[in-house]
Amino acid sequence: MIASLLVANRGEIACRVFRTCREAGVRTVAVYSDADENALHTREADTAVRLPGATPAETYLRADLVVRAALEAGADAVHPGYGFLSENADFARAVTGAGLVWVGPPPEAIEAMASKTRAKKLMGLEPLEHVGAEDLPVLVKAAAGGGGRGMRIVRELTDLEPALEAARAEALSAFGDGEVFVEPYVEGGRHVEVQILADAHGTVWPLGTRDCSLQRRHQKVIEEAPAPGLGDELTDRLYELSVRAARAVDYVGAGTVEFLVADGTPHFLEMNTRLQVEHPVTEAVFGIDLVALQLRVAEGERLEGEPPSARGHAVEARLYAEDPAGGWAPQTGTLHRIAVPDGVRLDTGFADGDPIGIHYDPMLAKVVAHGATRAEAVRKLAGALERATVHGPVTNRDLLVRSLRHEEFAGARMDTGFYDRHLAALTEPAPDPYAPLAAALADAHGRSRFGGWRNLASAPQTRRYRMHGTEHEAAYRHTREGLAADGVRVVHADAGRVVLEVAGVRRTFEVTRYDGGRLFVNATALTELPRFPEPGADRAPGSLLAPMPGTVVRVAEGLAEGVAVRAGQPLLWLEAMKMEHRISAPAAGTLTALHAVVGQQVEVGALLAVVREETAPREAPADGAG
């Protein structure tokens, strides 16, 4: 029996595994980087061991340090979580070689399937060796890992080499393995996967399908179980292929077989030899705890009988600290408050007041809803997200709500191109016009009062706020009866709650203020602006500013001050939250300043470079007139 378990991961997944361990009476051990010294998973574990350093390469990707931590803490088993070393056969061997129980598949199974190139060959498929124009579009993919990292769609042959280079760099940073390959890109397909669970006695359970088609940057955003509209014949075929893949490598433990389904035909993608981020929807539908089953299988128990029966439908949304309208740029800062209504499941690696840093994935939480039908589960999840309290940096919460309510998703007609088609409409700002007024009234509460001697009406007071990137002004007055504003009746106003009556309809606004002039009025974020704006620092035309905090990981070869650049030319790359972000020339011209240095950490808004745009000489009129 496992008595003490180290989770070789961080954040949400570590907290998720710890929850099952507490219920089972298993002691828990966390590992943490310097950046995670006070992270939630570090605080929740019974014991925690420091891995010196901040980046994944220095810490969570160091198998030797993780194994040593398990031994030092007295753990007798290691759970790999997902990401990092979870699909690393050498790590699995190091764990078992140290006399510890490995809560995962055999190293040989990981080796066979962890490389997508070897997995495809095992399933009778081959990657593209030579890419011609007739093969386009193609997908460049990292052979190791997952989560959308190290992936690029290529539609022009001239883009192939840069895509390969970028994918290699990103894969090496995220997984410690820079191998990439090329395969045909299936347009308009659905991303469907099968959850499997196998024991060491030859039993393999297919535990339903999941649809994970809503993706950004090839990383899943909304997942559901079961995958809608497949039909019994296609579902049986997916089960057959998945069980065949598991048996081919003598698989043991939890795993996922992934497919693209187009025109009713499944195209094998890969087998993930680990627990998936989206496993909670399977747990909700089958009424099981996959982590508990992983522990039982690792202890040598049999999976008795047939798989449990499915019940209802479940949908999961990944809440990210990112700006979907700004190129999915990750966001950092303090997560002041996160809470969801009762009736849905919240899996998170953050608590109120925790910082969101630059070193790791920007996912804040997973929110999961279960219902008797798909429509019920989708409605429940959309409503819960809409009413959730998420105070901190910009998130994708509004995008999630709109996605769930989009007619294409509601009708189960989505595919992996959903956001390519609909992102602009889904991220169109929809500011609440009364949020600034509610903020101003809450701020004005108790500031000043007039005595009975004053007969003249007070002059309007104003407050200015930035909301959804634009400035808004709110005007109000102090009267004998209290606060007033044009066009509405102020029913109630105090520092935390404002009630307005608009055209006979009452609306309640909860107002929360944080340091730095940051406010939240219900779900709307506002920033208070000074009454007299201070002149901002002038920037030269063509200044390239860091769109997010991160680390400069590459500078284009030969780039130096005085060099001519073309419009759209990649100049340098930032790495933030395990993803690479390219900074390109905004126009053709000359690089007049270069401040970025490889390895440099920059804050959002930092000046990276300046491109002086070319100005074409004005042509003289044909008749020579000046």
Image: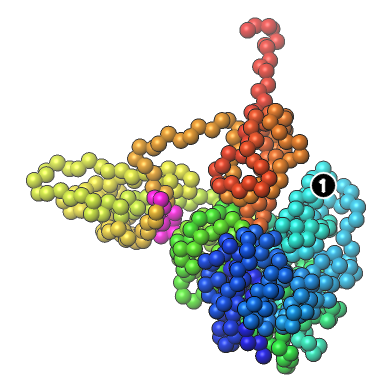
> Magenta includes 522?
yes
> Magenta includes 624?
no
Q: Is residue 538 above or below residue 372?
A: above
Front residue (pair 355, 397): 355
Front residue (pair 144, 476): 144
Res. 180 image quadrant: bottom right
Q: Is residue 4 above or below residue 473?
A: below
The answer to whether residue 204 of the structure is visible from this angle is yes
Front residue (pair 395, 34): 34
Res. 90 image quadrant: bottom right
* Residue position marked by numbered label 1 in the rendering: 161
Instruction: Judge from the rendering whether residue 414 lies leftward or rightward of residue 513; answer left or right.
Output: right
Q: Is residue 319 above or below residue 18?
A: above
- Where residue 621 sits: x, y (%)? 67, 11
For image coordinates 12% across by 49% down, the residue present is: 451
Q: How many other residues sit within 10 Å of disc 1, few (<14), some (14-19) or many (≥20)?
A: few
Instruction: Judge from the rendering whether residue 392 lies leftward or rightward of residue 146; answer left or right.
Output: left
For image coordinates 79% across by 66% down, the residue present is: 269
- Where residue 584 sits: x, y (%)? 68, 40
Kind of residue at badge 1: Glu
If the image is split into quadrants, where does the N terminus sit?
Answer: bottom right
SS at mark 1?
A: helix
Range of magenta residues: 516-525
- Where residue 367 sits: x, y (%)? 55, 70
